[in-house]
Image (cartoon, grey):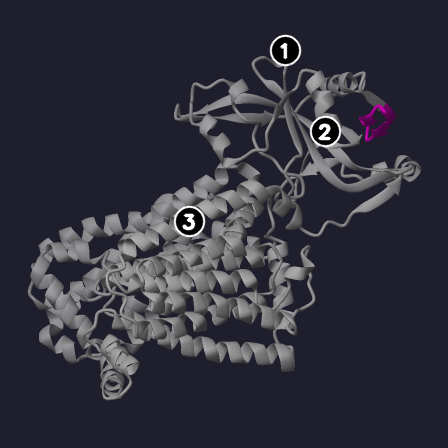
Amino acid sequence: MDQLQPYLDYFAAHPVWALILVFLVSLGEALLVIGLFVPSTAVLVGAGTLIGAGKLPFWPIMTATILGCIAGDQLSFWAGRIFGDRLRSMWPLRNYPHLLAKGEAYVKEHGGKSIAIGRFVPGIKSVVPGIAGMFGMGQLFFLVVNITSGIAWAAIHVLPGVLLGQALSLAGELSGRLLIVLMVLLGILAIGGWLVRVVATSIAPYRKAVQGRIAAWAKGRQSRSLRRFGMVIAPENPNSILLILLIVLGFASALALGDLVSGLLLRHAVSNFDQSVFNFFSELRSVPGDEIFIRATMFGDELVLLGMGLVPVLWFAALRNWRAAAATALALVVAKVILVGFSFGMGAPGAGALQSDFRFPSAHALEAGTVFGILAVITARGLNRWNQALIVTGFAMAVTAISFSRLYLGVNWLSDVAGGVLIAGIISVLFSVALATINLRRFRPLQLLATAVVVLFLGAAVNIQANIEKREERYQPIDKLITYSMADYMAEGWSKMPGQRINLVGRPVERFAVQWVGSVASLRSVLAQDQYKLWNRWSWRDTFSYLNPNGALADMAPKPAVHEGLRPKITATHDDPQHAPSRIVLKAFQSNARVKEGTDTNRVYLLNFVHESLKSNFGIYALPATGAIEEPEVQQIIEQLAASPQVEKLAEKTVNGQTVLILRPKS
């Protein structure tokens, strides 16, 4: 958070640079051919997220986006009008004759609608305005369609980011670090997708010639499998593009994996970078981020993925396609054998809470990449090109999310994750080549895909329901505990406890009036006895109660809060008759101190108190508004708590004129 915050603050303080960037990206995205290489979606959704988070103004950014895309299309249109057919032989269009042909066919088929619709169609959107100009479309008609579709295009790219930023900001101070983490993940996904598009576009002019030569060679062989491979890879086969991309991915993965392994074994070249990435994500850990990415990593647990991976094996077995079933099962077995083989000699020292997870390659990344990879290869065989792209993109995002969760939680090095993804890519490519030689017949790819996804979500749901608490404990950040004897704690340990709650941006807010030396269960019992209402841990479901602008405060969960990134262990409320209709909210946060007395060891919990009242927002939703409690009332509250028959008052300390009670449960 501290590393990226200056950049966010800079854009907030200098929005002109953000406006220039957004305008240039929107302009470049609409220029002839150049738009194929501009990562507009990543930049504009990111800008929208910053708008929703309150870092950038909405209307200036929206206006810059609209003007940029309109200007880009207009420039492309003028190029078509001025140069006409000569545009075909000019750079850069002369290097992409297939793209020009597709664009011409699209404009001829859809006429004037092609300007509006084509803006949203990947691949041809960067040539449609120029072709419209070549065909002599009227300037006034083009301008009207350009402006209206430009507004829609800008809204579709910016507004989702705005909603994301607002959703993250709804949780108040919980959103800061999570916003940064999700922006990093979004950036990884966007850059990955952009690189794939750039590579695919760059090789397109040479693809058919290379495919034709390989197909001709394979068809001329004696082997039946090679002849079938030649037919599958032939340019006229619509499924051949996916296979070619997978083969290119396989070669690239093999080269990258060789360099990575040699670095680990010979040069130890990645160790410093691994540590840097680990430290980077350690600083971004937050409670809502943990809740998201612990669940994401549980989708990649071995048993969950095994259940999903067995679906195509059993599917083909039920269809008596034994070769396809055996090939699928073999890919799963190979992934497991590689994991076992590497585990004997490639473990790296761990830096996080879960030492045993630091091994090369990451089991989660390799198994997720293998299972999703073979499913993508299988199901894409029976579908058209757009559905293939959708499936591959969705599965790639799932693998990225699971792999990213390992980095965020600090339980795998970056080299572990990269190695797992690369090995999974190689396995998927080899599997795709093997599958190309097998006749799958009618295997109903959509039904297979739906079944596999249902099994994945059911398995993950059962896993999360049964093991979420264990995993939350397992994946906790490194906690530097300090253990005191009771005498040492009473003498000086208590004074080393934080005096105020530290919110997510590092600012001290309300003070801690009570230090509780005991268990969470004992404190909950005391609060229940004193007529406090105990609330479950805050979750996104609690936002539903805020959507009713006429709801009662008593029915709404207290606003979430953290202390040094940690969520409270207990949240309780009590009616406040002195300031009706507000309520008193108590939160108990876990400290890093433990007190040992005899054979008993208890954690110290820090208690603070605030007022909450109801605040309606535009009659659309309502949120509890937090306010400070005057010191005399705080004294009254804590004395009432100390007077409980279940509580023993160990000491009453005074710091800066304010009383701090040290309490524990009676034996």
Left or right placement of residue 69 versus residue 478 in this view: left
Q: Tag 3, which secondary structure? A: helix
Query: What residue is pinned by disc 2?
Result: 521
Residue at the (62%, 43%) spot, across then down: 504
Front-most of residues 13 and 102: 102
Mark earlier in primary sequence (3, 2): 3
Amino acid type, residue under disc 1 in the picture: Pro
Vertical placement of residue 546 versus 67, above or below: above
Residue at the (39%, 51%) spot, across then down: 453
Q: Tag 1, which secondary structure? A: helix
Which labelled disc corresponds to residue 544?
none
Front-most of residues 96 and 518: 518
Q: CA distance from mark 3 to mark 1?
A: 52 Å
Camera-near label (1 vs 2) is: 2
Q: Which residue is the extreme one toward the top?
A: 577
In magenta, the rendered stretch is 649-667
Query: What residue is pinned by disc 3?
Result: 455
Task: Assign the magenta stretch its main secondary structure.
Answer: strand
Amino acid type, residue under disc 2 in the picture: Ala
Left or right placement of residue 426 versus residue 471 in this view: left
Q: CA distance from mark 3 to mark 2?
A: 37 Å
Asked if labels 1 and 3 touch by Cβ distance under 8 angstroms, the answer is no
Asked if labels 2 and 3 touch by Cβ distance under 8 angstroms, the answer is no
Q: CA distance from mark 1 to mark 2?
A: 27 Å
Asked if residue 187 can be seen in this view, the reply is: no
* Residue 532, image quadrant: top right
Query: What residue is pinned by disc 1?
Result: 577
The quarter of the image holding the C terminus is top right
